[in-house]
Image: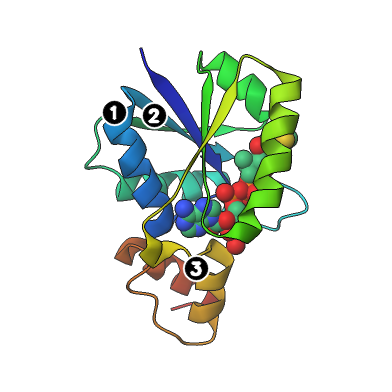
Amino acid sequence: MNNAIYPGSFDPITYGHIDIIERCSNIYDHLIVGVIQSNSPKKMLFNENERKNMIKTSISHLNNVEVKIFNTLLVDFASQEKCSIIIRGLRVLSDFEYEFKMALMNRNLNEKITTLFMMPHEKYTHVSSSLLKEVIYLGGNIDNYAPKEVIDNINKKINGK
Ligand code: COA
């Protein structure tokens, strides 16, 4: 089987992530979306089960994608899942340095695992989970950037609505 893992914090999932997941779902037989349980120093708005459930709801139209929580080294999670490909999204040039270091560290940790990069649709290149949370916090509209259920959940957490 031709498998891949798409890991991240997904706090929460956005249309940018979904764009990458849909592209991977067309290429690979089976895709595992790996949700990191905790990712210090990042402070999460949603716990891992909330993040996982929002992903599952947002990608329910894709039948070859599975969502799993992990709390180990990414390469160990990949090995455990018998998966040799890690997918990461590259949005803008500023992503490159961080991704480059992470890909090389992961390769040094386990040379059998390869990181591949994919570009989301250009309408999502400026999107990140933090930015969406900030816009909602300040009363802005993010309807074009995340599913309604996700927006409702952010609103509940941040604004108590
Ligand atoms: N569309 C929209 N936003 C995107 C995106 C896309 N296609 N791709 C990334 N982003 C955003 C995310 O929303 C996130 O935004 P935020 O910082 O505002 O929350 C940001 O880009 C980066 O997030 P993400 O892709 O989730 O990466 P991360 O840096 O939070 O997590 C892990 C990276 C989980 C893969 C990494 O920490 C990891 O592997 N941890 C396991 C432990 C380990 O092995 N460590 C050693 C690694 S070398």
Q: Amino acid at mark 3?
A: His
Nearer mark to the viewer, of 3 and 1: 3
Mark 3 to mark 1: distance in Å?
A: 28 Å
Q: Quadrant of the N terminus?
A: top left
Specify few, some or many for label 3: CA neighbours under 10 Å numbering under 14, 14-19, or 20 or more.
Answer: few
The residue singled out by tag 3 in the image is 126
Count neighbours of disc 1 (C-alpha within 10 A) and say few if under 14, some if 14 to 19, many if 20 or more: some
Toward the viewer: 102 or 75? 102
* Residue 17's disc number: none
Q: How many marks?
A: 3
**Amino acid carrying mark 1 in the image:** Asn
Going from N to C along the chain, the mark reached first, 2 or 1, is 2
Q: Position of residue 59 (x, y in %)?
A: 30, 45
Kind of element beneath mark 3: loop
- Indicate which disc, 2 or 3, sits on the residue closer to the N terminus: 2
Residue 85 visible at all: yes
Q: Is residue 151 left or right of residue 115?
A: left
Quarter of the rendering containing residue 134: bottom right
Query: Residue 25 appears in which quarter of the rendering?
Result: top left
CB of mark 3 within 8 Å of CB of mark 1?
no
Q: Give the residue pinned by disc 2.
A: 31
Image quadrant of residue 148?
bottom left
Going 55% across and 60% down the picture, which residue do you hit? 92
Which residue is denoted by mark 1 in the rendering?
Answer: 64
Circles 2 and 1 in contact, beta carbons < 8 Å: yes
Of the residues tagged 2 and 3, which is closer to the observer?
3
Q: Residues within 10 Å of mark 2 (few under 14, many from 20)?
A: many
The structure residue drawn at horizontal position 27% and vertical position 34%, both measured from the top left corner, is 26
Image location of residue 81, percent across then percent down:
51, 17
